[in-house]
Image (cartoon, rainbow, N blue to C red):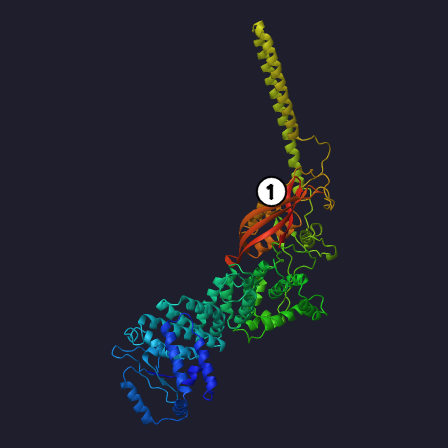
């Protein structure tokens, strides 16, 4: 049997090796035993080849003859006729196998070997058939992995009967040895291709070896090594597949499928599950960032929006980037608005105010953009924005420049289809689709975050960014509202921002129109509504007095008649019952007197007091006297708080009431009034603003809560203040109209601040604990 080996390679020596080096190499190779999974047959066959190589090369005469043949095969080219004659001899010699051209070929039933022409320039040696397993093992140790597969695989196919006939030795031992050698060659070849950056080829080699072991049901430990390498190789394989041209649809789809399998095992992009890739959370995030450059914006949107539903904060943030990029590039502000809604959910745990400012800018909501910049803590971007807004009364010029630069340098390069696109805010706002959408968009107020206290700010009324270069619109006409025959005109009044209140509620009040200056009421005349109302009141008062007098006289007459009847009955009674009847009569008179007194009081209240002289004309349209403004001094006549301490049961009830009111206020029905039943300032104003903003935006949320109260602590110096610490498991789904935008599932530890007002406990504020 001819095998492409030479004695020098078997011992791992160069042709110039000395006799001492020869002996040392033989000793070292003999001591280096193969893996323990090999049978004794393979180990013995390997040692026979080592001994034979050492014996030939140790004999000086034999080494000279071998070297001459070795050098002739290496450097001389045989003639075509000699090659053909040698090939014919090899075909007719029994028990001879040569190089295999295709690892997938199988021997036919009449042939025991596969025939192929050997390379005339490759040295080879003749071995016995029972040394074939040893020769495969030596080739595998020398790194000839492809050659091992080419020589060994055909004997493992169903069409080969060489092993079954015992040509290479005991089939029960030889077949597992060949399977092991071929599979190890797949393993090592896969690792070698991995190092060379051929990730897809490496994956195929490992999968081929694993498939062979699974088919033969052998060597689970080796199969485990292959599986571990396949898991670690997956990120590299994904990058290689996704970097292929977009025309390679099947290959890129396979890369996305492998990625989804990894994400499922990890539990999301920022999940803590084990996908056996060896990548920690930070390393995996870097991998995702590297991978994004090979995905289009639509591919990223599909991927990250699905991942955001786990929920995943990172996937939500990446979805924001995708929606921003797509919305800007495709001139679809609706996608930018969805991105802004997602940022509202992220604002709970991280500073995303700068991104919110960019979203608000692209939606034309300049005041919201300015307020978001005030809350941002990112120093370098803010310094850049301020530097480029020095000659402007606000930060909008710098924000426009920053948004353009940010989209061009940090957003678009992460999308395969947008990396070479240019960014121009002027072209964006000049687009007719953008202008039409922004004109139809309501003027939103910034929605506060659910779990974070938003610091109140004073500012000018909300404006709308006009398209660059567009003609400014005509000033809006004041709206009118009809009331009967008269018209009420609402005229906006300038607000002095220097005296704006500090709470969100007082801020809204400061920006509202002044009723005394803005509402013009019609003047009451002699025949107007005020005069007729006064006449109806006097007529009603007279009718009430007459009715009361008639009813009182009737009751008195009936009482006198009843008294006459009782007197006649008393006279006819026997003496022994007279005393008892007198007592009953007295009690009846007392009861009748009590009833008459109550009726008299009721009739007096119904008829009203008697009015003397000319009465003032009082109308429903205006107060009779000027009503003074509400004083900021707290009411000193409020009822004293109910005594007693806050218990865990009461705490659970009040927090559960808040969670129910929250679900109702932000739900599809927008029951904002329920917030007043459980909240007080400053939380009440903040949540009213949030609920009203979502109602205007046609957005809502659906909640599911689980509550566990961990402790209650009453203020030792003020029994009307208390703190409740609770564990809140919240599941929420955010909807834009009827479309699910995002969802989350969180387990939060919250500390609620409670105050007792008018005998009822209410929630002032809360804080999410670490």
Residue at image mark 1: 648
The quarter of the rendered structure image containing the C terminus is bottom right
Q: Say whether residue 358 is left or right of residue 157.
A: right
- State the residue in front, 622 or 42: 42
Q: How many labels, in total? A: 1
Callout 1 secondary element: helix
Image point 73% across, 35% down: which residue?
A: 614
Q: Position of residue 33 (x, y in %)?
A: 43, 74
Please identify the quadrant where the N terminus is shown: bottom left
Instruction: Say which of 360 and 119 sits in front.
Output: 119
- Of 54 and 196, the residue lying toward us: 54
Instruction: Name which quarter of the figure residue 423 lies in.
Output: bottom right
Q: Quadrant of residue 247?
A: bottom left
- The x and y percentages for residue 593 are 63, 19
Pick out the residue farthest to the top: 575
**Vertical placement of 660 versus 120: above or below?**
above
Quadrant in which residue 404 is drawn: bottom right
Number of residues whose C-alpha sits closer than 10 Å to that of mark 1, classed few (under 14), some (14–19) or many (20 or more): some
Q: Is residue 763 above or below residue 50?
A: above
Locate residue 292, reporting x and y percent: 53, 70
């Amino acid at each position: 049997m001819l095998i492409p080996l030479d004695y020098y390679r078997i011992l791992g020596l160069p042709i110039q090796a000395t006799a001492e080096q020869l002996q040392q190499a033989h000793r070292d190779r003999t001591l280096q035993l193969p893996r323990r999974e090999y049978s004794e047959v393979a180990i013995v066959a390997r040692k026979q080849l080592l001994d034979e190589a050492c014996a030939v090369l140790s004999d000086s005469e034999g080494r000279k003859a071998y070297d001459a043949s070795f050098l002739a095969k290496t450097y001389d080219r045989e003639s075509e006729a000699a090659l053909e004659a040698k090939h014919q001899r090899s075909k007719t010699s029994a028990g001879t196998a040569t190089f295999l051209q295709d690892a997938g070929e199988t021997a036919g039933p009449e042939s025991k070997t596969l025939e192929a022409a050997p390379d005339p320039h490759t040295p080879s040696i003749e071995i016995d058939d029972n040394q074939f397993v040893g020769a495969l093992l030596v080739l595998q140790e020398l790194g000839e992995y492809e050659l091992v597969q080419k020589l060994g695989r055909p004997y493992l196919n169903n069409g080969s009967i060489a092993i079954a006939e015992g040509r290479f030795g005991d089939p029960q031992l030889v077949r597992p040895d060949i399977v092991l050698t071929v599979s190890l060659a797949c393993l090592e070849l896969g690792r070698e291709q991995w190092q060379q950056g051929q990730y897809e080829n490496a994956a195929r080699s490992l999968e081929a070896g694993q498939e062979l072991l699974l088919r033969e049901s052998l060597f689970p430990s080796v199969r485990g090594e292959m599986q571990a390498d396949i898991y670690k190789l997956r990120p590299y394989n994904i990058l290689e597949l996704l970097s292929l041209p977009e025309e390679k649809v099947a290959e890129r789809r396979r890369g996305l499928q492998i990625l989804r399998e990894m994400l499922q095992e990890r539990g999301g992009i920022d999940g803590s599950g084990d996908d056996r890739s060896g990548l920690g959370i930070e390393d995996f995030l870097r991998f995702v960032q590297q991978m994004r450059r090979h995905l289009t914006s639509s591919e990223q949107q599909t991927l990250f929006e699905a991942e955001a539903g786990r929920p995943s904060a990172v996937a939500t943030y990446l979805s924001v980037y995708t929606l921003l990029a797509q919305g800007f590039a495709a001139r679809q502000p609706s996608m930018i608005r969805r991105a802004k809604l997602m940022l509202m959910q992220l604002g709970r745990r991280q500073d995303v105010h700068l991104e919110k400012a960019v979203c608000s800018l692209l939606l034309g909501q300049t005041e919201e953009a300015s307020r978001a910049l005030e809350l941002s803590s990112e120093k370098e971007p803010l310094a850049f924005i301020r530097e480029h807004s020095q000659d402007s009364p606000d930060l909008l010029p710098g924000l426009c420049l920053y948004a353009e630069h940010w989209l061009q340098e940090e957003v678009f390069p992460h999308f395969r289809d947008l990396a070479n696109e240019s960014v121009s805010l002027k072209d964006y706002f000049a687009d007719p689709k953008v202008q039409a959408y922004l004109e139809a968009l309501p003027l939103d107020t910034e929605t506060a975050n659910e779990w974070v206290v938003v610091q109140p700010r004073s500012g000018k009324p909300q404006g709308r960014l006009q398209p660059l270069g567009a003609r400014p619109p005509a000033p809006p006409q004041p709206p009118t509202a009809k009331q009967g025959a008269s018209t009420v005109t609402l005229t906006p009044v300038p607000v002095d921002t220097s005296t704006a209140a500090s709470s969100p509620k007082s801020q809204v009040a400061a920006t509202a129109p002044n009723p005394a200056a803005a509402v013009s009421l019609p003047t009451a005349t002699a025949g107007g509504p005020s005069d007729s109302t006064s006449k109806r009141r006097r007529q009603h008062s007279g009718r009430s007095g007459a009715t009361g007098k008639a009813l009182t006289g009737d009751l008195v007459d009936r009482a006198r008649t009843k008294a006459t009847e009782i007197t006649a009955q008393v006279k006819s009674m026997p003496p022994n019952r007279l005393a008892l009847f007198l007592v009953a009569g007295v009690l009846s008179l007392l009861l009748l007197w009590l009833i008459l007194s109550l009726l008299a009081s009721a009739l007096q209240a119904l008829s009203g007091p008697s009015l003397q002289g000319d009465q003032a004309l009082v109308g429903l349209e205006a107060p009779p006297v000027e009503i003074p403004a509400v004083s900021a001094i707290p009411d000193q006549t409020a009822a004293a708080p109910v005594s007693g301490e806050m218990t865990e049961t009461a705490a659970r009830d009040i927090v559960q009431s808040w969670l129910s009111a929250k679900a109702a206020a932000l739900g599809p029905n927008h029951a904002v009034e329920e917030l007043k039943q459980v909240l007080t300032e400053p939380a009440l104003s903040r949540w009213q603003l949030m609920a009203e903003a979502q109602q205007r935006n046609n957005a809502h949320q659906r909640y599911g809560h689980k509550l566990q109260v961990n402790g209650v602590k009453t203020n030792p110096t003020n029994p009307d203040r208390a703190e409740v610490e609770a564990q809140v498991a919240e599941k929420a789904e955010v909807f834009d109209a009827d479309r699910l935008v995002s969802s989350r599932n969180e387990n939060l530890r919250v500390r609620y601040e409670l105050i007792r007002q008018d005998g009822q406990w209410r929630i002032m504020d809360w804080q999410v604990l670490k």
